[in-house]
Amino acid sequence: MSSIARKLAGPSSSRGTRILGALALVSTVLLLLLGLIWSPREVDQADAVRLMYVHVPSAVVGLYFAFGVTLVGSIVYLRKQSDFWDLMAHAGAEIGVLFCAFVLVTGALWGRPTWGVYWEWDPRITSTTVTLVLYLGYLAVRRMDLDPVVRSRRAAILGIISFANLLIVKQSVEWWRGLHQGSTVGIDTQMDGLMFFTLAWGVLTFTLIFAWLLMHRFRLAWYEHQAAAVSLDDAIAARRGEHRSSLAGEAI
Amino acid sequence: MHWQYVIPGYVIVFAGLGVYTASLMSRLRSAARKIPEEKRAFLE
């Protein structure tokens, strides 16, 4: 591997992440071609439909996959006090917040030509915004200056409560009337073949990007965890050194 | 039609992913420097 490629791949790259990164990159190029050029206009939405090829994948990957990782990590942490799952939960939440922000921005940009407004207090839009705020709160808890065990436990509880809100997001289009349409992709989907393929390709692409980001974000969390342990070991060694010196001084 | 909404949407998503990735790599390099080589080895 060349030094430039190694630098681009980052200090935590491995064979697996390099293959995954290359696949994600190729898949992204194909998604851009499919989404912006090859797929047809929609009769009612015209070219605005192209926003769906990044909006829906952001929602699927961010809200369900990324925050799902946080949910699983939080539950396992509370049961087993596993550092691995605690760090994994943190990694999932950070990436999920990024994708959740994409959902809201692309949804607003799609809403303006389709509904005539960027924002409406619609149940789906509002509950998705609440989700973003909840997970920003989760990330704030992770930065609190607390005992690490207490901080992880509080974050895990919030990670579980926040995921419960996603059930409201999912059901919001069924429970209340609003601008946002109900579920349109299912077994009896009416989408044009290439449009449906592009949407599915978008989900695949964003899943690859998410998996690549998650591996690196987890490794960052692990490095920070190790760095904290190293600095604690150094502090203990320094304290022992001082203690030995003072004992030696008293003996003289 | 409506490209004035489509292009900003794609730019925000992919530029956002690019900026986050660059920031993640920078944080990784910085964190990796703080720990001894042997503590990173298990990841490979």
Image (spheres, coloured by chain):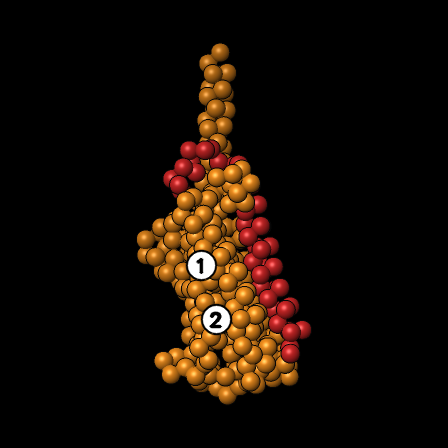
Same subunit, labels 2 and 1: the answer reads yes
Task: Name the residue tied to disc 1.
Answer: A208
Q: Pick out the residue farthest to the left.
A: A80
Name the element at disc 1: helix
Name the element at disc 2: helix
Spot occupied by residue A97 in the image (x, y as percentages of width and height): 52, 62
Quarter occupied by residue A186: bottom left
| Chain letter for the red colouring in the rendering | B
| Chain letter for the orange colouring in the rendering | A
Three-letter amino acid code of the residue under disc 1: Leu
Q: Earlier in the sequence, mark 2 or mark 1?
A: 2
Q: Pick out the residue farthest to the right.
A: B4
The numbered disc on residue A198 is 2
Say above or below: A128 vs A158: below
Mark in front: 2 vs 1: 2
Residue at 45%, 40% (x, y): give it: A226
Quarter occupied by residue B29: top right
Image mark 1: chain: A
Image mark 2: chain: A
Three-letter amino acid code of the residue under disc 2: Thr
